Image: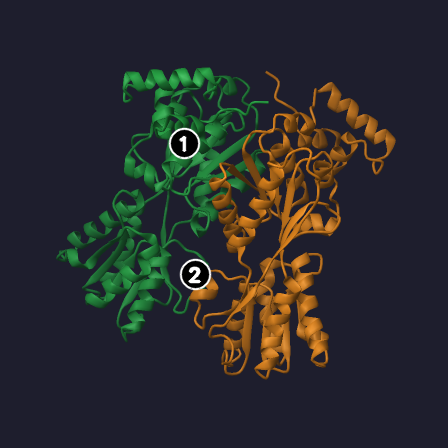
Chain colours: A green, B orange
Amino acid sequence: MKPKLTLKQIARELDVSISTVSKALRDSSEIGEETRKKIKAFAKLYNYRPNNIALSLKNRKTKTIGIIIPEIVHYFFTTVISGVEQVANEMGYNVIVCLSNNSFDKEVLNLEMLANGSTDGFILSLAKETMQKEDYHHLTEVTNQGMPVVLFDRVVDEIHCDKVIIDDVIGAKKAVQYLLDKGSKKIGLVSTVDYVSVGKLRTRGYLEVLRENNVEIDDKLILKIEDMDNSETEIKDFIDKNEVDAVFAVNEHFAIYAIKAIQEKGLKVPEDVSVIGFTDGELSKRFIPSLTTVSQHGERMGAEAARLLIDKLERKPEEEESYRTVIVETNLIERNSTKL
Amino acid sequence: MKPKLTLKQIARELDVSISTVSKALRDSSEIGEETRKKIKAFAKLYNYRPNNIALSLKNRKTKTIGIIIPEIVHYFFTTVISGVEQVANEMGYNVIVCLSNNSFDKEVLNLEMLANGSTDGFILSLAKETMQKEDYHHLTEVTNQGMPVVLFDRVVDEIHCDKVIIDDVIGAKKAVQYLLDKGSKKIGLVSTVDYVSVGKLRTRGYLEVLRENNVEIDDKLILKIEDMDNSETEIKDFIDKNEVDAVFAVNEHFAIYAIKAIQEKGLKVPEDVSVIGFTDGELSKRFIPSLTTVSQHGERMGAEAARLLIDKLERKPEEEESYRTVIVETNLIERNSTKL
């Protein structure tokens, strides 16, 4: 029996990207007419069936929710899954998890697989590469056809759907204001590159609160990590080169690396330098000094996302369609990495 | 349109367990004839279609692997998923993850969902409750019908399939021998209850190596945690009540709790008491003192499991069926929680 052709195989055979195949099959004008024709002819020849979302919606009773996350070895995302599971189970839904590994192509392929009749709707946090490319056609396509999608944490305005976010700007402002209140004057920021929405928002919070307090912004005190694999070295260099009396890091790993670098420089945390992280994982709790942190409440975010999705799934057709954004409040957990 | 009936709904309607429905539909003699008849009649009335594995096998080309794990907020399992992903992606397979949350019923439901044509085979680590019940009918059923299954970490002899394990006994022996070699005489063990296979095997390693070294076994120095939520308190009591000069803990959380309890008792790690953990997560690496640990190599286990499964999926029908058990070697990583 001939195996079913996938997007990936078509892309490989015709030596074009998965995104090109996906767009061509949806007749996107972004793709030149000739390429579009070639791809569609090839797909037809091999009986490729694109997502028949309309059909699967008619039979929509898989009672299964799909989650697509960018990373799995990551405490925050596992707590979100845990929150989705709890609500889904209470409401009689199964949950399937897929990973994009921060790859745009894998996100497209996962969506193709899960939209093909095995789930009723999705909960998704965007892959880094997707945000970098700013290519959301796979998601807008799905939502346009009426398949419910809830985005969480890494969201963008371009996709119209329900969303669950935290108040990243306010969370960051709380952290930096706290440091200012304790007397810190030279506060370093360890963030991610700007195309990661949460990194950008937390950076905005840092800048806003400094301005509000009339503290001069020194670009040298802002580090934006591009390559996660190299983050420990980059943070060490940053700490070695700059004199700071506090560090605000946008995740707990960056915070721990900062503490190590500060200690290796012969300084003490929190006596010489205070450090605040983001996310509240095991590491934050158990590290010595335990980490003062902005808590993201992953489990609560997952639960909210599941509620939004199931609400949509169980909505009567005559009810009006509308999108909601739930903001889960952060709070600052004071521990031992900041001055009392 | 009438929603498709699920195992769970039949169980609820007839007020019997999911396991009873599952067994009755498979005509198991464990279920009384009257109950069996009633369940089958009900299922027929509502057009319930049990897993048609034979059918899905014929069309087996979903190119998708299912993983069912007991817990998600758990570093070891996330690294296994990561290992499966890497190999699966290289070989052109997608991966779907489901959680049993250590519940037997959820494991049965997940299996039902994934075996229904959406995956070609499974990689699974057993739920605690399944091992406690010793009820494996859902898995033997699937394997008997020729659907490839690979068990990892939490495995049992009763299920005939490919398996990936670590040498838990040898890993534990390495750890305890190391403590003895450094002069420890009263070594406490913090383990789990015996129905968790890995806890049992690591306990066996501890006992074996003490016997081999003619060290008297003191039952008071063995703690078996039943309730994970209460583990921190139980470990604190255990450390407070007993005089030990070393602790071997079967996971990194138990090890960290032990270190905290030892420090709160006014003793030092490793000067007064050495501590060794199992698994090599972020916590082990970053904790101060960093934790000497038996590394479980989750990623390698996941990669091996994926290779075994894909081998089976791509085996030609005429090749002889055989089962393999791959043992991934552990090694002791020396850090600062044990004497030099």
The disc labelled 1 sits on which kind of residue? Val
Q: Quadrant of residue B169?
A: bottom right
| Point 46% across, 75% down: residue | B336
Q: Residue furthest front?
A: B318
In the drawing, does residue B160 fall left or right of residue A212?
A: right
| Point 47% across, 45% down: residue | B86
Question: Residue B278 appears at what percent x and percent y?
Answer: 56, 64
Q: Considering the numbered disc 1 on the image, is that residue within a helix, a strand or a loop? A: helix
| Point 61% across, 21% down: residue | B3
Mark 1 to mark 2 CA distance (whole Å): 33 Å
Q: Quadrant of residue A62?
A: top right
Q: Considering the numbered disc 2 on the image, is that residue within a helix, a strand or a loop? A: helix
Q: Which residue is mark 2?
A: A283
Q: For the residues tagged 1 and 2, is the chain the same?
A: yes
Q: Which residue is mark 1?
A: A108
Question: Residue A318 appears at what percent x and percent y?
Answer: 46, 16
Question: Residue B274 appears at what percent x and percent y?
Answer: 54, 77
